[in-house]
Image (cartoon, rainbow, N blue to C red):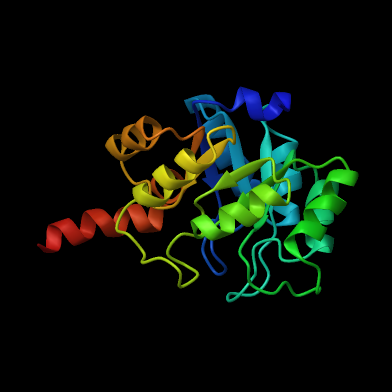
Amino acid sequence: MNQIIEQLKGGLIVSCQAYPGEPLRHPETMAQMAMAAEIGGASAIRCQGLADIAAIKGQVKIPVIGIWKEGDEGVYITPTLRHARCCMAAGADIIALDATRRPRPDGLTYAQTVKALHQDGAIVMADCGSVGDARQAVEAGSDIISTTLSGYTGERPKTDGPDFALLKSMVAEFPNMPVFCEGRIHTPDQLTEVMNCGAWAAVVGTAITHPTSITSWFKARLNR
Protein backbone atom coordinates (compact mmCIF):
# COMPACT_ATOMS: atom_id res chain seq x y z
CA MET A 1 0.00 0.00 0.00
CA ASN A 2 1.14 3.52 -0.73
CA GLN A 3 2.94 5.10 2.21
CA ILE A 4 0.77 8.24 2.13
CA ILE A 5 -2.43 6.20 2.40
CA GLU A 6 -0.91 4.09 5.16
CA GLN A 7 -0.08 7.14 7.26
CA LEU A 8 -3.66 8.40 7.03
CA LYS A 9 -5.08 5.33 8.79
CA GLY A 10 -7.07 6.35 11.84
CA GLY A 11 -6.59 10.01 11.00
CA LEU A 12 -8.65 13.17 10.73
CA ILE A 13 -8.61 14.85 7.33
CA VAL A 14 -9.80 18.46 7.37
CA SER A 15 -11.52 19.91 4.32
CA CYS A 16 -10.67 23.58 3.82
CA GLN A 17 -13.08 25.05 1.29
CA ALA A 18 -15.11 28.22 0.93
CA TYR A 19 -18.04 28.70 -1.43
CA PRO A 20 -18.07 31.31 -4.22
CA GLY A 21 -18.88 34.78 -2.94
CA GLU A 22 -17.95 34.04 0.67
CA PRO A 23 -15.51 36.25 2.63
CA LEU A 24 -13.05 33.40 3.22
CA ARG A 25 -12.76 32.39 -0.43
CA HIS A 26 -9.12 33.28 -0.99
CA PRO A 27 -6.11 30.98 -1.41
CA GLU A 28 -4.11 32.67 1.35
CA THR A 29 -7.04 32.40 3.76
CA MET A 30 -7.53 28.72 2.99
CA ALA A 31 -3.80 28.14 3.44
CA GLN A 32 -3.99 29.77 6.87
CA MET A 33 -7.00 27.60 7.69
CA ALA A 34 -5.05 24.52 6.63
CA MET A 35 -2.07 25.52 8.74
CA ALA A 36 -4.33 25.93 11.78
CA ALA A 37 -5.85 22.50 11.13
CA GLU A 38 -2.38 20.95 10.88
CA ILE A 39 -1.41 22.46 14.24
CA GLY A 40 -4.62 21.02 15.68
CA GLY A 41 -3.66 17.51 14.59
CA ALA A 42 -5.09 17.04 11.08
CA SER A 43 -3.43 14.20 9.22
CA ALA A 44 -4.21 15.65 5.78
CA ILE A 45 -6.02 18.53 4.09
CA ARG A 46 -8.68 18.31 1.39
CA CYS A 47 -9.05 21.46 -0.71
CA GLN A 48 -10.61 22.77 -3.89
CA GLY A 49 -9.19 24.66 -6.84
CA LEU A 50 -5.72 24.99 -8.28
CA ALA A 51 -4.83 28.20 -6.47
CA ASP A 52 -5.88 26.78 -3.10
CA ILE A 53 -4.06 23.49 -3.71
CA ALA A 54 -0.84 25.32 -4.57
CA ALA A 55 -1.14 27.77 -1.67
CA ILE A 56 -1.87 25.05 0.89
CA LYS A 57 0.78 22.65 -0.41
CA GLY A 58 3.36 25.38 0.08
CA GLN A 59 2.44 25.85 3.75
CA VAL A 60 1.71 22.43 5.27
CA LYS A 61 3.78 19.29 5.72
CA ILE A 62 0.85 16.88 5.73
CA PRO A 63 -0.62 15.37 2.52
CA VAL A 64 -2.98 17.41 0.39
CA ILE A 65 -6.04 15.88 -1.27
CA GLY A 66 -6.93 18.03 -4.25
CA ILE A 67 -10.15 18.48 -6.17
CA TRP A 68 -11.32 20.93 -8.80
CA LYS A 69 -15.03 21.69 -8.90
CA GLU A 70 -16.51 22.96 -12.15
CA GLY A 71 -20.25 23.49 -12.42
CA ASP A 72 -22.83 22.57 -9.80
CA GLU A 73 -24.69 19.56 -11.17
CA GLY A 74 -23.90 16.15 -12.58
CA VAL A 75 -20.23 15.19 -12.47
CA TYR A 76 -18.48 18.35 -11.25
CA ILE A 77 -15.88 17.20 -8.69
CA THR A 78 -12.69 16.85 -10.74
CA PRO A 79 -14.91 15.93 -13.68
CA THR A 80 -12.30 15.23 -16.36
CA LEU A 81 -8.81 13.84 -16.78
CA ARG A 82 -7.61 17.37 -17.55
CA HIS A 83 -8.94 18.66 -14.23
CA ALA A 84 -7.24 15.81 -12.38
CA ARG A 85 -3.90 16.35 -14.08
CA CYS A 86 -4.06 20.05 -13.26
CA CYS A 87 -4.62 19.19 -9.59
CA MET A 88 -1.52 17.01 -9.75
CA ALA A 89 0.48 19.82 -11.32
CA ALA A 90 -0.69 22.20 -8.58
CA GLY A 91 0.83 19.88 -5.98
CA ALA A 92 -1.92 17.56 -4.75
CA ASP A 93 -0.62 14.32 -3.24
CA ILE A 94 -3.97 12.56 -3.75
CA ILE A 95 -6.49 13.34 -6.48
CA ALA A 96 -10.16 12.96 -5.53
CA LEU A 97 -12.73 12.68 -8.27
CA ASP A 98 -16.38 11.90 -8.79
CA ALA A 99 -16.59 8.11 -9.01
CA THR A 100 -20.29 7.84 -9.79
CA ARG A 101 -21.58 5.95 -12.79
CA ARG A 102 -22.85 9.12 -14.44
CA PRO A 103 -21.43 10.29 -17.80
CA ARG A 104 -18.20 12.27 -17.53
CA PRO A 105 -17.90 15.54 -19.48
CA ASP A 106 -14.84 14.45 -21.47
CA GLY A 107 -16.44 11.19 -22.59
CA LEU A 108 -13.93 8.99 -20.76
CA THR A 109 -15.14 6.28 -18.43
CA TYR A 110 -14.17 6.40 -14.79
CA ALA A 111 -11.90 3.38 -15.35
CA GLN A 112 -10.14 5.07 -18.25
CA THR A 113 -9.56 8.15 -16.12
CA VAL A 114 -8.11 6.13 -13.25
CA LYS A 115 -5.84 4.17 -15.58
CA ALA A 116 -4.44 7.36 -17.10
CA LEU A 117 -3.88 8.92 -13.68
CA HIS A 118 -2.08 5.83 -12.42
CA GLN A 119 0.18 5.98 -15.46
CA ASP A 120 0.94 9.55 -14.37
CA GLY A 121 1.80 8.29 -10.89
CA ALA A 122 -1.27 9.66 -9.11
CA ILE A 123 -3.04 8.32 -6.02
CA VAL A 124 -6.78 8.27 -6.75
CA MET A 125 -9.53 8.79 -4.19
CA ALA A 126 -13.00 7.80 -5.41
CA ASP A 127 -15.87 10.02 -4.22
CA CYS A 128 -18.81 7.60 -4.20
CA GLY A 129 -22.53 8.04 -3.67
CA SER A 130 -23.56 4.39 -3.32
CA VAL A 131 -22.25 0.85 -3.03
CA GLY A 132 -22.67 0.56 -6.80
CA ASP A 133 -20.30 3.47 -7.27
CA ALA A 134 -17.85 1.88 -4.85
CA ARG A 135 -17.91 -1.37 -6.81
CA GLN A 136 -17.09 0.49 -10.00
CA ALA A 137 -14.34 2.42 -8.24
CA VAL A 138 -12.72 -0.71 -6.83
CA GLU A 139 -12.92 -2.51 -10.16
CA ALA A 140 -11.27 0.47 -11.83
CA GLY A 141 -8.35 0.24 -9.43
CA SER A 142 -9.01 3.26 -7.20
CA ASP A 143 -6.64 3.57 -4.28
CA ILE A 144 -9.24 4.93 -1.82
CA ILE A 145 -13.03 4.85 -1.78
CA SER A 146 -15.14 7.37 0.11
CA THR A 147 -18.76 8.10 1.02
CA THR A 148 -18.39 11.72 -0.13
CA LEU A 149 -21.32 11.90 -2.54
CA SER A 150 -23.92 10.03 -0.49
CA GLY A 151 -27.18 11.94 -0.63
CA TYR A 152 -26.17 14.06 -3.60
CA THR A 153 -26.69 11.77 -6.60
CA GLY A 154 -30.28 10.59 -6.14
CA GLU A 155 -29.33 7.01 -5.27
CA ARG A 156 -29.51 7.45 -1.51
CA PRO A 157 -31.41 9.84 0.76
CA LYS A 158 -29.45 12.68 2.31
CA THR A 159 -29.00 11.76 5.96
CA ASP A 160 -28.86 14.37 8.73
CA GLY A 161 -25.43 13.14 9.75
CA PRO A 162 -22.94 10.73 8.17
CA ASP A 163 -24.35 7.91 6.06
CA PHE A 164 -23.42 5.18 8.50
CA ALA A 165 -25.32 2.53 6.55
CA LEU A 166 -23.34 3.20 3.38
CA LEU A 167 -20.08 3.31 5.30
CA LYS A 168 -20.78 -0.05 6.95
CA SER A 169 -21.75 -1.60 3.60
CA MET A 170 -18.57 -0.37 1.92
CA VAL A 171 -16.35 -1.54 4.77
CA ALA A 172 -18.03 -4.96 4.79
CA GLU A 173 -17.86 -5.49 1.03
CA PHE A 174 -14.34 -4.17 0.58
CA PRO A 175 -12.43 -5.15 3.74
CA ASN A 176 -9.05 -4.70 2.07
CA MET A 177 -9.74 -1.20 0.75
CA PRO A 178 -9.13 2.08 2.59
CA VAL A 179 -12.68 3.41 3.07
CA PHE A 180 -12.94 7.07 4.02
CA CYS A 181 -16.07 8.57 5.52
CA GLU A 182 -16.84 12.07 4.29
CA GLY A 183 -20.01 14.06 4.54
CA ARG A 184 -21.97 15.64 7.41
CA ILE A 185 -19.69 14.61 10.28
CA HIS A 186 -20.66 17.47 12.58
CA THR A 187 -19.70 16.33 16.08
CA PRO A 188 -16.87 14.44 17.82
CA ASP A 189 -19.40 11.77 18.82
CA GLN A 190 -20.28 11.21 15.16
CA LEU A 191 -16.58 11.00 14.36
CA THR A 192 -16.13 8.33 17.03
CA GLU A 193 -19.01 6.32 15.60
CA VAL A 194 -17.59 6.65 12.09
CA MET A 195 -14.26 5.22 13.20
CA ASN A 196 -15.99 2.46 15.15
CA CYS A 197 -17.72 1.48 11.91
CA GLY A 198 -14.35 0.71 10.41
CA ALA A 199 -13.50 3.83 8.45
CA TRP A 200 -9.85 4.09 7.46
CA ALA A 201 -10.00 7.86 7.96
CA ALA A 202 -12.61 10.59 8.30
CA VAL A 203 -12.96 13.85 6.41
CA VAL A 204 -14.50 16.75 8.32
CA GLY A 205 -15.04 20.11 6.68
CA THR A 206 -18.02 22.28 7.56
CA ALA A 207 -17.91 21.64 11.32
CA ILE A 208 -14.29 22.82 11.48
CA THR A 209 -13.67 25.26 8.66
CA HIS A 210 -16.99 26.86 7.70
CA PRO A 211 -17.85 29.54 10.28
CA THR A 212 -20.98 30.66 8.44
CA SER A 213 -22.58 27.24 8.87
CA ILE A 214 -21.35 26.84 12.42
CA THR A 215 -22.78 30.25 13.37
CA SER A 216 -26.11 29.34 11.79
CA TRP A 217 -26.29 26.15 13.89
CA PHE A 218 -25.90 28.15 17.10
CA LYS A 219 -28.34 30.81 15.91
CA ALA A 220 -30.93 28.15 15.05
CA ARG A 221 -30.64 26.78 18.57
CA LEU A 222 -31.27 30.25 20.01
CA ASN A 223 -34.35 30.61 17.83
CA ARG A 224 -35.86 27.49 19.38
Q: Nearer the viewer, residue 48 or 93?
A: 93
Residue at horizontal 76 percent and vertical 57 percent from the top: 111
Q: How many marks?
A: 0
Quadrant of the drawing holding the C terminus: bottom left
Residue at horizontal 50 percent and vertical 55 percent from the top: 131
Quadrant of the drawing holding the N terminus: top right
Rendering coords of residue 202 (x, y %): 47, 38
The part of the image, by quadrant, that contains residue 48 is bottom right
Rendering coords of residue 38 (x, y %): 56, 29
Rendering coords of residue 72 (x, y %): 58, 74
Residue at horizontal 55 percent and vertical 41 percent from the top: 33
Q: Nearer the viewer, residue 139 or 216?
A: 139
Q: Residue furthest right?
A: 119
Q: Residue furthest left?
A: 224
Q: Is residue 143 above or below residue 212?
A: above
Q: Is residue 102 above or below residue 87?
A: below
Rendering coords of residue 171 (x, y %): 47, 39
Q: Nearer the viewer, residue 65 or 125?
A: 125
Judge from the rendering whether residue 132 lies leftward or rightward of residue 155; answer left or right. right
Judge from the rendering whether residue 86 lies leftward or rightward of residue 61; answer left or right. right
Residue at horizontal 66 percent and vertical 30 percent from the top: 5
Q: Is residue 107 above or below residue 13?
A: below
